[in-house]
Image (cartoon, rainbow, N blue to C red):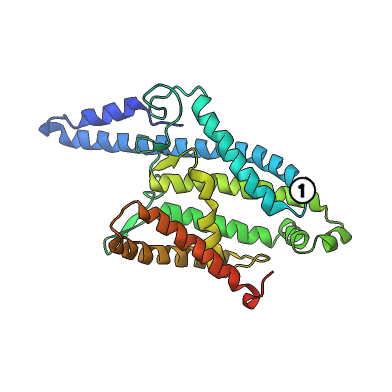
Amino acid sequence: MFHVSDALTTLKKGVMFVSEDRRGVGLLLDQSIETNITVAAMAGFLAACLMAIVMALAAGYGYGLLLNRMRGSEMMVGNYLNFSVISLMCIAWMVLPFKNGKIIWAMGSGVRSTITLEENYEKILDNLWSFDVFGITIPSGTLLLVALLCLAMWLFVRSKAGIMMSSSGSNPMFGAAIGIDNDRVRMQGTILSTVLGAVGILVYSQSFGFYQRYNAPIMMAYPAISAILIGGATTKRATIGNVVVGAILYQSILTIALPVASEMLSDSSLSEILRTIVSNGMILYALTKLDGGKAR
């Protein structure tokens, strides 16, 4: 975890006690401190992204090696590996020697299940160049980053490496016939997707303002699967347009469905269950509509 300097926070609080006749100087000093805090928070976020990318490269490489040895059983391997890694990390969060009091339990050991980012880089991208429209805050920084990543992916799939990856994935025998190393391309795709996922969860967490540990990541991929399928993607083809449209439709459905369900059912604990039902229901609906409902 990367934390904003406590000295900057203390100094900022001290500015509040500047006398009335020095208010102008105090305002300038406060603005300078705010800028320093923002820079420190952005530096922490970028450092977290860098560490996540390094670890994702190693994890993606190992996962790619496993997939190359388990051809034809990727979905089963992915599910079992997901549960295995989550269980392993649950043990790791309890036994690793973390010392920061803000992220460990009060008993002195083990990482908390939820770690807030309030004093670190909470909404660092959301607040970057944000503005209000009819009382609605537009998170310009986050939207700009998503747009840049979409553009980068759109350019990649049209590059030589992207075309080779598409050919190898759609027809491995044809790819091998024209000289494509399917194992190498599969490795590249696995590493790339792992890196994007690592950076993506950091962007997600800074927007919500917290990290979740232990069993929280088990169902993390299902909303993304649901969104991209309802956006028109198939098991063989997905585009940036499917991602954007699917995200809008998925969030719109949840925004409408969950408040209505909460009004009908008084038990607040049912909201998460209903969200899961809606998410998985959309996945089933989208899969039944593949190829006119004749998908195999």
State the residue at coordinates (62%, 75%).
Answer: 293
Report helix, strand or loop for mark 1.
loop
Report x, y in % for residue 180.
Answer: 83, 56
Report x, y in % for residue 152.
Answer: 60, 56
State the residue at coordinates (63%, 78%).
Answer: 292
State the residue at coordinates (69%, 69%).
Answer: 296
Report x, y in % for residue 55.
Answer: 61, 36
Asked if residue 214 is positioned above or below residue 197 in the image, the reply reads above
Q: Amino acid at mark 1?
A: Met
Image quadrant in which you'd find residue 131: bottom left
Image quadrant in which you'd find residue 290: bottom right
Q: Is residue 289 left or right of residue 205?
A: right
Q: Does the image show residue 231?
A: no
Q: Is residue 117 left or right of residue 220?
A: left
Number of callouts: 1
Asked if residue 217 is positioned above or below residue 104 in the image, the reply reads below
Residue indicated by mark 1: 70
